[in-house]
Image (cartoon, rainbow, N blue to C red):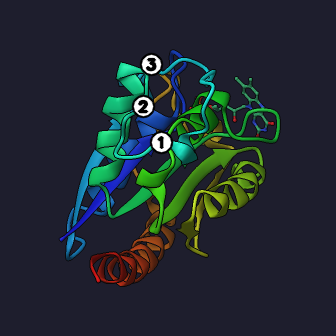
């Protein structure tokens, strides 16, 4: 079984990420060989990175900050990641970049896929996250799911209208297929 962590990349009140999450969990519920756990950055209120030593120099998860250590343990459990990200000023949210920056070895040699949203589907945020992931020695899979103008898919209460995300289900399943392939390949390689 591949342990896939789904990371909610935004923490603001009324965030769209928490509305996309249940749809993702529903679409991927039957995926073979994968178990999913959602990681909410609200539950890991890490300080903005200010340590004297780079996370890449920290061994065995011995990060100075307690919350970062807890975060590192969760990231260490994973075989692959699915990151849900909005686009803030044509980039990923600072809270997500900080969560990526705060640990290092725990990301290494693992696959990552992206689900994004925004006026152009959050594509610019994802294109910035790909080199970040590469520098963390991760494998960003080719397929991403970009949801354009999610606000047009919501009702007056701010919920997604029934079935509004369904046209994106096949792209999400393609993403899961790539995550499974790379997740298994890298898990085998890590275990050697
Ligand atoms: C600080 C900020 C900057 C934003 N910049 C962009 C942007 O550059 N491109 C875009 O498509 N949407 C932008 N938006 C709109 C977001 O796509 C929209 O608010 C989305 O719901 C944010 O994700 P969240 O609800 O999960 O926080 C921005 C929103 C905020 C709060």
Whether 119 is drawn above or below 136: the answer is above
Residue 189: quadrant of the picture? bottom left
Distance from Cα at disc 2 to Cα at disc 3: 15 Å
Residue that badge 3 annotates: 45
User: Which residue in the structure is indicated by mark 1?
Assistant: 58
How much space separates mark 1 and mark 2, taking CA atoms?
7 Å
The local secondary structure at tag 1 comes to loop
Say whether marks 2 and 3 touch (CB < 8 Å).
no
> Alpha-carbon neighbours of circle 2 within 10 Å: few (<14), some, or many (≥20)?
many
Q: Residue at x 78, y 52 (%)?
A: 124
Marks 1 & 2, CB-CB < 8 Å contact: yes
The image quadrant of residue 115 is: bottom right
Percent x, y of residue 94: 67, 29
From the viewer's perspective, tell me whether residue 124 is left or right of residue 159.
Answer: right
**Which quadrant of the structure image shows residue 132?**
bottom right
> Mark on residue 156?
none
Q: CA distance from mark 3 to mark 1?
A: 20 Å
* Label 3: how many Cα within 10 Å (few below 14, some 14–19, many 20+): some
Which element type, helix, strand or loop, lies under badge 2?
loop
Which quarter of the rendered image does ligand 1 occupy? top right
Q: Secondary structure at mark 3?
A: loop
Residue on which the image places disc 2 = 63
Find residue 87 and report its horizontal and vertical position in percent.
Answer: 71, 40
Foreground: 21 or 106?
106
Residue 171 x, y percent position in the rendering: 51, 71
Mark 1 or mark 2: which comes first in sequence?
1
């Amino acid at each position: 079984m591949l342990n896939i962590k789904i990371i909610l990349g935004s923490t603001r009140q009324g965030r769209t990420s928490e509305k996309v999450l249940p749809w993702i969990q529903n679409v991927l519920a039957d995926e073979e060989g994968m178990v999913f756990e959602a990681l909410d950055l609200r539950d890991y209120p890490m300080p903005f990175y200010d340590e004297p030593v780079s996370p890449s120099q920290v061994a065995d998860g011995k990060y100075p900050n307690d919350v970062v250590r807890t975060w590192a343990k969760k990231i260490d459990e994973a075989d692959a990641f699915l990151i849900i990200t909005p686009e803030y000023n044509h980039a990923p949210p600072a809270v997500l970049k900080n969560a990526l920056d705060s640990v290092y070895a725990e990301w290494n040699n693992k696959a990552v896929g992206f689900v994004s949203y925004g006026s152009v589907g959050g594509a610019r945020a994802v294109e910035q996250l790909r080199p970040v992931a590469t520098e963390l020695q991760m494998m960003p899979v080719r397929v991403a799911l970009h949801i354009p103008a999610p606000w047009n898919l919501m009702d007056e209460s701010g919920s997604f209208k029934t079935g509004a995300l369904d046209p994106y289900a096949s792209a999400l399943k393609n993403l899961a297929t790539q995550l499974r392939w790379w997740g298994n390949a890298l898990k085998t390689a890590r275990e050697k």
